[in-house]
Image (cartoon, rainbow, N blue to C red):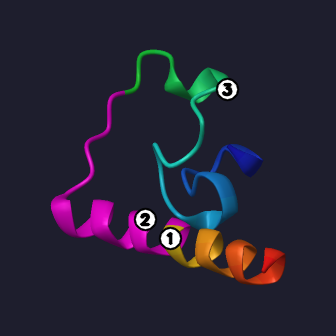
Amino acid sequence: MPNFDGTGPQGRGPRTGRGGGRCVQGNTVSLSKEEQVKVLNSEKAKIEAKLKDLQ
């Protein structure tokens, strides 16, 4: 977690990274369905952009 400020990777919020850091230890944060959709849509946009670049 950059700067240990609770923003998670790329400022998208907690529990949105790959879980490789020490922040995951002992901390359980649940995202609401709306937050999950927001995170997944962000990832989807990135993947679609990468696919477009490869075609």
**Which numbered marker is on residue 39?**
2
Foreground: disc 3 or disc 2: 2
For numbered disc 3, what is the local secondary structure?
loop
User: Of all residues shown, which one is farthest toward the left?
Assistant: 33
For numbered disc 2, what is the local secondary structure?
helix
Q: Which residue is mark 1?
A: 44
Q: Point out residue 49 in the picture as x, y percentages from the top left corner.
A: 68, 81
Specify which label sits upstream in the sequence, 1 or 3.
Answer: 3
Q: Main secondary structure of the magenta part?
A: helix
Task: Tell me how far mark 1 sits from mark 3, CA to CA.
Answer: 24 Å
User: Of all residues shown, which one is farthest toward the right?
Assistant: 54
Start-end of magenta stretch: 28-43
Report the amino acid beneath label 3: Gly
Which of the image's four quarters has the C terminus? bottom right
Q: Which residue is mark 3?
A: 21
Specify which label sits upstream in the sequence, 3 or 2.
Answer: 3
Q: Point out residue 43 in the picture as x, y percentages from the top left corner.
A: 53, 66
Q: Point out residue 20 in the picture as x, y percentages from the top left corner.
A: 66, 25
Specify which label sits upstream in the sequence, 2 or 1.
Answer: 2
Contact between marks 2 and 1 (CB within 8 A): the answer is no
Report the amino acid beneath label 1: Lys
Q: Quick check: 44 left or right of 28?
A: right
Task: Tell me how far mark 2 sits from mark 1, CA to CA.
Answer: 9 Å
Q: Point out residue 45 in the picture as x, y percentages from the top left corner.
A: 55, 78
Q: Residue at x 62, y 68 (%)?
A: 47
In the displayed structure, 49 sits above or below 32; it is below
Q: Quick check: 50 left or right of 9?
A: right
Near mark 1 (Cα within 10 A), the count class, few <14, some 14-19 or many ≥20, is: few
Instruction: Identify which residue, 2 or 34, lies in the foreground.
Output: 34
Foreground: disc 1 or disc 3: 1
Q: Residue at x 59, y 52 (%)?
A: 8
Instruction: Identify which residue, 46 or 18, lies in the foreground.
Output: 46
